[in-house]
Image (cartoon, grey):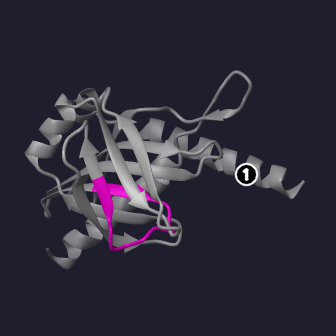
Amino acid sequence: MTINAYRLSVLAAGVVGVLGAGLFTASAQQQPQIPQGWFKACTKQEDVDICNVQNIVTAGNGQLVTGVSLIELKGKVNRKVFQVTVPTGRLVPPGIALQIDSGKAQKLDYVICFPDRCVAEVPLSDQLVASFKKGQGITLTSINFQNQPNPIKIALTGFSGAYDGPPLQQSDIEDRQKKLQDFVAKNNQDFAK
């Protein structure tokens, strides 16, 4: 893998942090809610088109629990990767186990950690995509610093539509990012009280 391809895949991993965290919408009571399920976001970086099919699981306070990304880079760099993002405080050697339905678990090795999250990845194969399309759910298991497994179950309902369908519009992404900024500002104000 070239340095540029690696940088772009790490950049794509950052999309989970930016787009994923920005998925807040207001309910009738103005409480932030995070849409559940699969979605696709695409962008262009230099001469490379990046499309990322994602499902992001967050805690009630908006913190990332697990993010799943199927990333495709096309153009000057061509690469497909499957990434899973989890919070820090995980044991690195075990990686993350991916299990589709009741099938055999596959190990994903960590490739990078940021101050707020770690990313594991494997090449994205057509077989993995087909398994997601046929499957009912996945279980992603990381091991925390207390040596305890943290299995996270994610339904595959809606995956095919997101994968094969159109991406979110840029205006939707910008709106979600603005809502995230408003949410963070409100939480900071509430915390300061």
Magenta residues (range): 83-97
Query: In this picture, is 18 found above or below 59?
Result: below
Magenta stretch, overall SS: loop
Q: Is residue 75 visible?
A: yes
| Magenta stretch encompasses residue 132 | no
SS for callout 1: helix
Q: Quadrant of residue 188?
A: bottom right
Left or right: 9 in relation to 27: left
- Residue 23 vs residue 4, the one in the foreground: 23
Which residue, as the protein is rendered here, is positioned at the far right?
Answer: 193
**Where does residue 83 sit, x and y in percent of width and height?**
30, 56
Residue located at (31% from left, 27% from top): 158
**Where does residue 51 sit, x and y in percent of width and height?**
26, 47
Q: Quadrant of residue 60?
A: top right
Left or right: 90 in relation to 62: left
Residue located at (20% from left, 60% from top): 122
- Residue 74 vs residue 124, the one in the foreground: 124
- Residue 139 vs residue 111, the one in the foreground: 139
Left or right: 190 in relation to 121: right
Which residue, as the protein is rendered here, is positioned at the far top?
Answer: 28
**Where does residue 11 sit, x and y in percent of width and height?**
35, 64
Residue located at (40% from left, 40% from top): 153
Name the amino acid, label 1. Ala
Query: In this picture, is 53 found above or below 114?
Result: above
For label 1, count other residues whose C-alpha is less than 10 Å away and answer few (under 14), some (14-19) or many (20+): few
Residue located at (52% from left, 72% from top): 115
Query: In this picture, is 26 found above or below 193?
Result: above
Question: Mark 1 highlights which residue?
Answer: 185
